[in-house]
Image: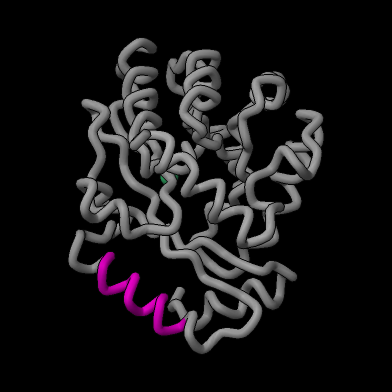
Amino acid sequence: MKLGELADIPVEMGYRYIAVTDHSKGLGVARGLNEERIIEQRKAIAALNRKLRGIRLLAGVEINIRSDGSLDFGEEVMKGFDIVVASVHSGFKQSGAQITERIVKAMRNPYVSIIGHPSGRLIGERDAYEVDMEKVIETAAETGTAIEINAYPLRLDLTEPYIRRARAKGVSLAIGTDSHNRGQFGNMAFGVSLARRGWLEKKDVLNTRDLRALLATLSAKRRKKKS
Ligand SMILES: [Zn+2]
């Protein structure tokens, strides 16, 4: 989708903002963006935001957590995003300890806002990877990182006991549709249903906050690291 078309989505869906999170370069199959292209995209988003009234596009990325737990971009590029989703897209056969360590390392990065599709399960296609979700939830609480409830019907991969557990630990959950085209934004309803099965209330969900509160939450994690 072009950015201009994306700007229609918040109006159609009744949202105040939407996060643009293209894949980073490591994900060749998804035509991930390199540094240069993502910086170009950020400029285009900023230009578009100057024209929009009452809605905002957030400049983000879905960054690849590499096999060794490092990320596709360095700090200089990372700090220019409004929001960063970090996810595992490779090395699914690693041991539980290795995969958990990769995700924990990503969460300790002050610029990582959300861990995307945290178990990696694709219904009918692929089991969850062996991740220690308790440890992920604990580290999320400690670092101020949110965890995604991925609303894509084949994912819905964070099961409700873990959603309840995350809530009990004070972790924010972000409901994301992982949309790759216009038709997928309606999947939000599935994510909301799953959140309810995990007993979440509005206050537990990162992206129910208004723009100001959302941005404050995201920058709080960045500041926490520095102090
Ligand atoms: Zn992903």
The answer to whether residue 127 is seen in the rendering is: no
**Image quadrant occupied by the C terminus:** top left
Q: Please tell me which residue is depicted at 23% across the width and 47% down the height of the picture.
A: 75
At a point 29% along the width and 51% down the height, the residue shown is: 78
What is the image's colouring? one colour
Total count of labels: 0
Residue 185 locus on image (x, y percent): 63, 62
Task: Judge whether residue 84 is colored magenta.
Answer: no
Compared to residue 108, the image places residue 131 above or below, namely above
Range drawn in magenta: 38-48
Residue 41 magenta-highlighted: yes
Percent of width and height locating residue 104 = 38, 23
- Out of 79 and 135, give the one closest to the viewer: 79
Residue drawn at x 55%, y 14% as measured from the top left: 134
| Helix, strand or loop for the magenta stretch, by majority | helix
Determine the image quadrant of residue 7.
bottom right
Q: Is residue 174 left or right of residue 133?
A: right
110 left or right of 173 in image: left
Q: Give left or right: position of 40 versus 104.
A: left
The quadrant where ligand 1 appears is top left
